[in-house]
Image (cartoon, grey):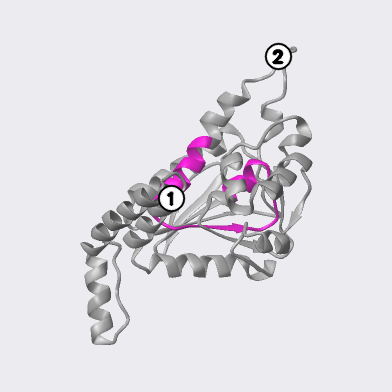
């Protein structure tokens, strides 16, 4: 396993999976500016390193991520910090990186996911949650709005009424309900979350990851395209996928009745 050195996250590359672990357990893995910079740096590594074919994001300790560390953004001398600047510097780059990374991103939610922590999880491609995990849009409780893609992603995942209830009431959502509402892919016992999520990530890393990235590109574009534009894009993406080594290998393996050996090319 190749490890990367950070202060507030743990990072490592094994079996094609780049794992990013939020590592401020004493404050429930809440974000400060340094942690946000490190997460963004790890996602850049995932984008630039061809050996990283999938990403797994999780948290250390009893929480996934409690959102922003409020001690870093407290009003001082009667003046409030520019929270818009905080969002633009810390959270928007992370969500943008996850959604535009043309590799699968798995999230393992191991406890509370609050505020930006919840919305970063929902930005990932496949979310596994421990049975005792909870999700909360905590913004309105302190007079704020959902950021980190929350106003974009939530309504698209659960519809307007449920998104409005989550954002405006700020109630906790348990893992089972989150699965029923389509916010998470699956719920597993907390004792097997880490192994299950890594196995899922490793499975994705062994697949034709160029095609998986093109699937993600198509899904992203489908959020804004009309039908004709999307059909045209599908033809373009299929043309690109059909020119990959992985497509050729997949066809050969099918004909030869053997397991394919995909390389992500």
Residue 245, given in percent of the width and then of the height, sits at 22, 66
Q: Quadrant of the N terminus?
A: bottom left
Q: Residue at x 71, y 41 (%)?
A: 167
| Other-residue count near label 1 (Cα within 10 Å), few / some / many at <14 / 14–19 / ≥20 | some
Would residue 23 be visible to someone looking at this image?
Answer: no
Q: Residue at x 34, y 55 (%)?
A: 231
Q: CA distance from mark 1 to mark 2?
A: 42 Å
Q: Along the horizontal axis of the image, is 256 left or right of 87? A: left
Q: Which residue is mark 1?
A: 222
| Other-residue count near label 2 (Cα within 10 Å), few / some / many at <14 / 14–19 / ≥20 | few
Q: Along the horizontal axis of the image, is 215 left or right of 248? A: right
Q: Is 83 contained in the magenta span?
A: no
Q: Residue at x 39, y 62 (%)?
A: 16
In this rendering, the answer to whether 135 lies above or below 193 is above
Would residue 245 be visible to someone looking at this image?
Answer: yes
Q: Along the horizontal axis of the image, is 240 left or right of 64? A: left
Residue 62, given in percent of the width and then of the height, sits at 71, 55
Residue 94, given in percent of the width and then of the height, sits at 50, 41
In terms of sequence position, does the residue under pointer 1 or pointer 2 come before the other? 2
Q: Secondary structure at mark 1?
A: helix
Instruction: Locate residue 13: give its quadrant.
Output: bottom left
Instruction: Locate residue 168: give its quadrant.
Output: top right
Q: Which residue is mark 2?
A: 79
Q: Along the horizontal axis of the image, is 187 left or right of 199? A: right
In the image, which is nearer the foreground, mark 1 or mark 2? 1
Instruction: Locate residue 76: give its quadrant.
Output: top right
Given residues 84 and 219, the one toward you in this image is: 219
Q: Secondary structure at mark 2?
A: loop
Given residues 180 and 132, the one toward you in this image is: 180
Residue 132, given in percent of the width and then of the height, sits at 74, 62
Magenta range is 92-121
């Amino acid at each position: 396993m190749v490890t990367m050195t950070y202060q507030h996250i743990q990072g490592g590359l094994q079996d094609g999976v780049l794992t990013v672990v939020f590592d401020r357990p004493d404050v429930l893995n809440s974000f400060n500016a340094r942690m946000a910079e490190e997460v963004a740096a790890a996602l850049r590594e995932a984008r630039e390193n061809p050996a990283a074919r999938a990403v797994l994001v999780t948290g250390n300790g009893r929480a996934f991520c409690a959102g922003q560390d409020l001690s870093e953004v407290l009003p001082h001398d009667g003046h409030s910090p520019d929270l818009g600047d905080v969002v633009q510097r810390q959270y928007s780059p992370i969500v943008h990186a996850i959604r535009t990374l043309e590799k699968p991103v798995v999230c393992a939610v191991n406890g509370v996911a609050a505020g930006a922590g919840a919305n970063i999880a929902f930005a990932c491609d496949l979310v596994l949650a421990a049975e005792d995990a909870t999700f909360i849009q905590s913004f309105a409780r302190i007079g704020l709005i959902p950021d980190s893609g929350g106003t974009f992603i939530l309504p698209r995942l659960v519809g307007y009424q449920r998104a409005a209830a989550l954002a405006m009431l700020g109630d906790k959502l348990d893992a089972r309900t989150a699965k029923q509402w389509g916010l998470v892919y699956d719920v597993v016992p907390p004792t097997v979350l880490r192994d299950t999520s890594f196995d899922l990530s490793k499975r994705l890393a062994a697949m034709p990851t160029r095609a998986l990235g093109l699937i993600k590109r198509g899904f992203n574009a489908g959020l804004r395209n009309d039908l004709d534009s999307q059909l045209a894009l599908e033809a373009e993406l299929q043309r690109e996928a059909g020119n990959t080594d992985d497509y050729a290998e997949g066809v050969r393996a099918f004909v030869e009745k053997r397991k394919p050996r995909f390389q992500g090319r």
